[in-house]
Structures are given as structure tokens and as C-alpha cells.
Amino acid sequence: MKRLLIATRNKAKLREISDFLSDLPLKLVSLSDLGIKEDVEETEKTYRENSQKKAIFYAQKSGLPTIADDGGLEIDVLGGKPGVLSRRYFGKDNKAATDEEIIEAVKKLVKKFSQKKLSAKFKTVVTLVLPGGKEAKLPKVFSQTGVVHGILKKPLIKLMRGYPYRSFFYLPKIKKYYHESELSTHEQKMYNHRYKAISRLKPIIIKALHL
């Protein structure tokens, strides 16, 4: 069975991506499974550039077809921020913030703009990279985008480890929070930005890996 590397250290994200790809005849492996300890800094200006940077690095490091993603929350009143800085925007000295730091910061933001409709969207780009072969060919790179729209409200008491923004993200269409405790199994996919991107990427994975 062919192997596919899911290049993330976020356990929640690893679990989610693995679930979304579980219907394919693949052996999904993680960075820890392969003993890969190197990290890639997300220094680029777009989700696409960051996701491709990570996927290319880990595909070349592992020699395996690799999936990586980058995404974030874009809040309209902040001009689309935090965006690519979603993990660092509310951190200290531009360092990655903890879930708790993000939660406290967004609580203050929601309170500050309590009289306004805080429209926002989650956006992600998922990239598949096929590593170059023995002839040192350039890797093949494929990227797809997923977006889900909503508004920010007072948070649910129950928080999702690894996904601090989701406890604030409300989906007006179905009147539920973007949270696993609120959504049915079907809704967790239909209203998931990462699922939307991976669904678009699946036909490419199937063709590229000859599944």
C-alpha cells in the first residue's frame, strides 16, 4: 500500500486530515512516525506559499508524497487579519500564541465589537507534493483552496484543543458553532474549510498516485 505523509505537528489537524483521507487506499503516516524533527517556518505572505513550502520540504526530506496545509481566520473589521499570522497575531513578540492566549484575545475583540456583526471566514490551502525522482526532477506541486464563512460571537464554554478560533465561529446558515460538539458528522465535513480543499484535491491524489 502506498504511503502518504501528512506534514503537521498539530494533533487535531492530523486527526482531521487523516479522517478526510480515510476512504483512500493509502497508509497515512505522520512526521513523528518517520522520526522527522525539523520544522519549517511559515514565513511566506500567503497560505499557498506556506503550504507549498512545507509540503516541498517534507516531501524531499521523506521521499514520500506529502500533504501540508496553511490557513487562518480572516476577520473583516481587522482588514482580513490575522490571516497567515493566525497563530502569531495574538502572541507575544510575534511568537506562536497558545490556545489560551488566542481565546482571551478574541474574547476581548468580540466584547469590543459587541454591537457589530463580526463577519469572518476560515480559509486554507492544502498542497500535495510528489517528490522528485532519481534524476533530481523538480517536485510536482498541486494546491487547492477551501473557505467557510461565518461570524464571531461569544465563545462556547467547551474549547477545541488545537482549534481555539472555532469556539467563537458561528455558522448562521445552520445556527451552530463551528465546533465538533455542535455539528453532526455530516456537518463537520460540509462546513469545514479543510474538507472542502481536500475534496478538491482528492481526484488529483487518486490520479497522481495511481490509486
Image (tube, helix red, strand yellow):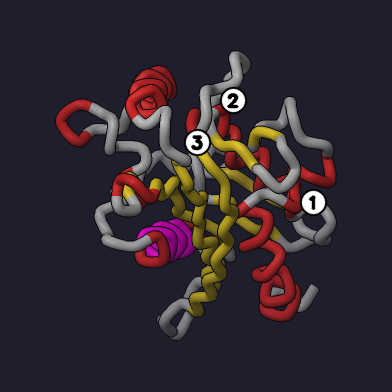
| Badge nearest the viewer, 3 or 1 | 3
Residue in the foreground of this view, choosing between 110 and 137 = 110
* Quadrant of the snapshot with the N terminus: bottom right
Q: Position of residue 200 (x, y in %)?
A: 67, 70
Contact between labelled residues 1 and 3, with CB atoms less than 8 Å apart: no
Q: CA distance from mark 1 to mark 2?
A: 22 Å
Q: Secondary structure at mark 3?
A: strand
Residue 160: which numbered mark, if any? 2
Q: How many marks?
A: 3
- The kind of residue tagged 1 is Ser
- Give the magenta range: 50-59
Q: Residue at x 65, y 33 (%)?
A: 177
Dot 3 or dot 2, earlier in sequence: 3
Q: Position of residue 156 (x, y in %)?
A: 60, 20
Can you tell which quarter of the image residue 198 is in?
A: bottom right
Disc 1: CA contacts within 10 A as few (<14), some (14-19) or many (>=20)? few
Q: CA distance from mark 3 to mark 2?
A: 16 Å
**In the figure, is residue 22 to the left or right of 160?**
right
Is 55 part of what is drawn in magenta? yes
Q: Secondary structure at mark 2?
A: loop
Tell me if residue 55 can be seen: yes
Q: Looking at the image, is 91 positioned above or below residue 128?
A: above
Q: Position of residue 183 (x, y in %)?
A: 77, 35
**In the figure, is residue 67 to the left or right of 115?**
right
- The kind of residue tagged 3 is Leu
Residue occupied by mark 1: 22
Contact between labelled residues 2 and 1, with CB atoms less than 8 Å apart: no
Residue 152: which numbered mark, if any? 3
